[in-house]
Image (cartoon, grey):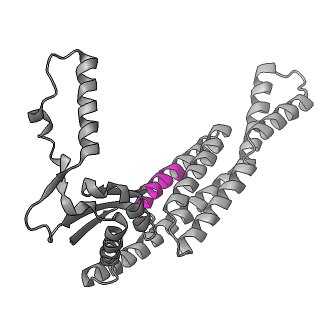
Amino acid sequence: KRIQVEMKSLNHRYLEIFLRMPATISSLETEIKKKIGERFSRGKIEVSIRIDNEGNQDGTLMLNLPLVRQYYSLLSQIKDELHLPDEVTLSMMSGFRDLYMPKEVEEDLAGLWKGLEGVLAEAIDKLTGVLAEAIDKLTDMRITEGEALGRDLACRMDKIQQLLRIIALRAPEVVVEYRQRLSDRVRELTQGIIIDEARIHQEVAILAEKSDITEEVVRLESHIGQFMELLEGEEAIGRKVDFLIQEMNREVNTIGSKSGDAETARQVIEIKSELAKVREQIQNVE
């Protein structure tokens, strides 16, 4: 037999494997996907497998009787379900090309898999740049692009950290300004009446407790640190970083909802804008 395997990879968020192969080897689908999954963690991998029976020169064919019976059963079920007048005929059944197969297909699939596995391994090697010079150049370009992308992501994380520091430093001032505004407003409304300073302190304390963002700031800083560690690692980080970005957005949203300060709100918008850019770039990272 002559076995031909063609593979193509596209950038993708997850690992998805699409197989086009003869129905006669459909039982090998799991083994084929497992073999490919050993070498790839992300990407859309399209695999086309063709098997030519070179030894079957006389064109001897045989019927795939189990499939014939299944087609007939399904067509009869459709007829009965929809109360159709037509009968399941020979001319109708003969139109299904996969009912016929070369006689040699009866051979042991284990032997066929042994040959296919070798061809598949060679195709995978070529696809990943082990044997093909063109893929080697592509790999070098990906490394160069990845380094540039890494620097861009690091800069964006640094900017987010700077914005976060501004928010953290601003937080105590927000409480002080609230206390001053509250005192001024009360004095304005009471017009000289003695003010209960203890009650003002109580209101300020309640606001300080409700608007405390210490936990969110600490967690966000921790996520940024983890993000930078992942950038410096060697393993695939795309999915982990996707999750981290989600967690960062959650903390930033909480900070924005807790603070009623306009300046803090501006910093929150800036951080969310940077996170959106990071998330878009991460789609290009394995």
Q: Is residue 16 left or right of residue 262?
A: left
Residue at horizontal 17 percent and vertical 53 percent from the top: 62
Whether residue 101 is situated above or below residue 119 in the rendered picture = above
Residue 286, position in %: x, y?
Answer: 44, 66
Query: In this picture, which residue range is highlighted in magenta?
Result: 271-286
Residue 261, position in %: x, y?
Answer: 64, 40
- Residue 247 or residue 205, whichever sits in front: 247
Q: Is residue 173 left or right of residue 8?
A: right
- Residue 119 or residue 11, whichever sits in front: 119
Q: Is residue 17 left or right of residue 224?
A: left
Is residue 160 on the magenta stretch? no
- Residue 245 or residue 158, whichever sits in front: 245
Q: Is residue 111 left or right of residue 230?
A: left
Is residue 130 shown to the viewer in this render?
yes
**Does the magenta stretch mainly form a helix, a strand or a loop?**
helix
Question: Which image quadrant for residue 258?
Answer: top right
- Residue 184 or residue 142, whichever sits in front: 142
Residue at horizontal 58 percent and vertical 64 percent from the top: 227
Is residue 12 shown to the viewer in this render?
no
Whether residue 47 is situated above or below residue 255 in the rendered picture = below
Residue at horizontal 31 percent and vertical 70 percent from the top: 116
Question: Which image quadrant for residue 74?
Answer: top left
Is residue 282 on the magenta stretch? yes
Residue at horizontal 44 percent and vertical 63 percent from the top: 34
Residue 75, position in %: x, y?
Answer: 23, 29
Residue 277, position in %: x, y?
Answer: 44, 55
